[in-house]
Image (tube, grey):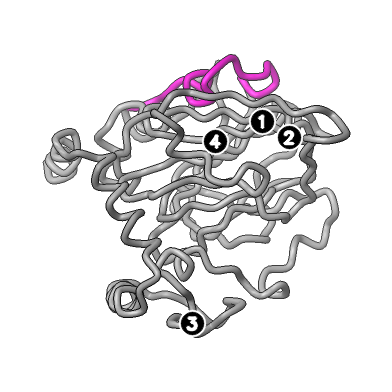
Amino acid sequence: MGARLFAWLQYLLPQHAISRLVGWLGRREQPWLRTVLVRGFMRLFPVEMSEAAEPDPLAYPSFNAFFTRALRPDARPMPETPEALACPVDGRVSQCMEVEDGQLFQAKGFRYDLDRLLGGAAPDALRCGSFATLYLAPYDYHRIHAPAAGRLVEMRYLPGALFSVNGATVSAVPRLFARNERVACLFETEFGPMAVVLVGALNVGSIATTWAGEVAPGPDRQAAFWRYPQEGPGSVNLERGAELGRFNFGSTVIVILPQGGPRFAPAISAGRKVRLGETLAS
């Protein structure tokens, strides 16, 4: 009952207005405001600064710069096996299982459509592939990295709601990940197509990628699609572990792998805490 009440209250909130305000405050570079926000956040959450490239939380010009801080280059080595896929984020596994005839499992009683999640027809190999849903808590590292080397084929910005993506809301709001604002990135890899979906949430000020900058929220919140050439100007190729994008506040990443491709590691199971760079699949 508590989870349902929490979810229903979010239907009544001005989700986008609240998120814009939080994003605006997070970008202000007034030292006093930065200090108040950073110190307040660190009192609420167990923030780990020892792996940050800049370990002093008050050395950042704004709260947002602190929140999206980079790690030291040696902080998260990639898997030793060259063909292994790397976990793209710090977070917790919400779900990890097969895609069943184009449907993904969200929570007990809830599934959602792969095509709707991606904002268009999914590659056939993904329709019976496998997926992992990775939840980033507010205190986690908030940059997203490429699980495998690949060429970006298409990016899709899908406007939508901004429900919270915590466990209570995921278990109460139908098709949550396919209705929230999101950025879907479709890659071609040596093992076939791979999708990495960055899902927005309440208080997520924006979603940015390394090749396009801030993508969400988009102008007038209209859906947008970008195709990328195989080579030459405008092409985007990422090595495993390269930075892919970032959330300006916490949210969720969904990685979808093709049928017959790499299998998620047994350790990537629901409820497990994961870290950037550990083996995701092989």
Circle nearer the viewer, 1 or 4: 1
Amino acid carrying mark 3 in the image: Ala
SS label for mark 4: strand
For the record, the magenta segment spans 110-127
Q: How many marks?
A: 4
Q: Nearer the viewer, residue 48 or 202?
A: 202
Would you say the residues marked 1 and 4 are in contact, meaning their CB atoms lie under 8 Å apart? no
Query: Viewed as shown, does residue 42 lie left or right of 66?
Result: left
Residue displayed at 52% across by 49% down: 269
Q: Position of residue 261 (x, y in %)?
A: 75, 33
- Where residue 8 sits, quadrant-wise, is top left
Q: CA distance from mark 1 to mark 4?
A: 19 Å
Q: Residues within 10 Å of mark 3 (few under 14, many from 20)?
A: few
Mark 4 or mark 2: whose residue is earlier in sequence: 4
Q: Residue at x 68, y 69 (%)?
A: 76
Q: Are marks 2 and 1 in contact (CB under 8 Å)?
A: yes
Observer-side mark, 1 or 3, equals 3
Residue 248: assigned label: none
The answer to which image quadrant residue 17 occupies is: top left
Camera-nearest label, 3 or 4? 3
User: What is the residue that sits farthest to the right in this orientation?
Assistant: 232
Q: Which residue in the protein does label 3 denote? A: 59
CA–CA distance in space, label 3 to label 4: 41 Å
How packed mark 1 is, by other alpha carbons closer than 10 Å (few <14, some 14-19, many 20 or more), is many
Mark sitting earlier along the chain (1/4): 4
| Lower sequence index among marks 3 and 4 | 3
The residue singled out by tag 1 in the image is 186
Could you say where residue 265 lies in the image, as x and y percent from the top left? 66, 49
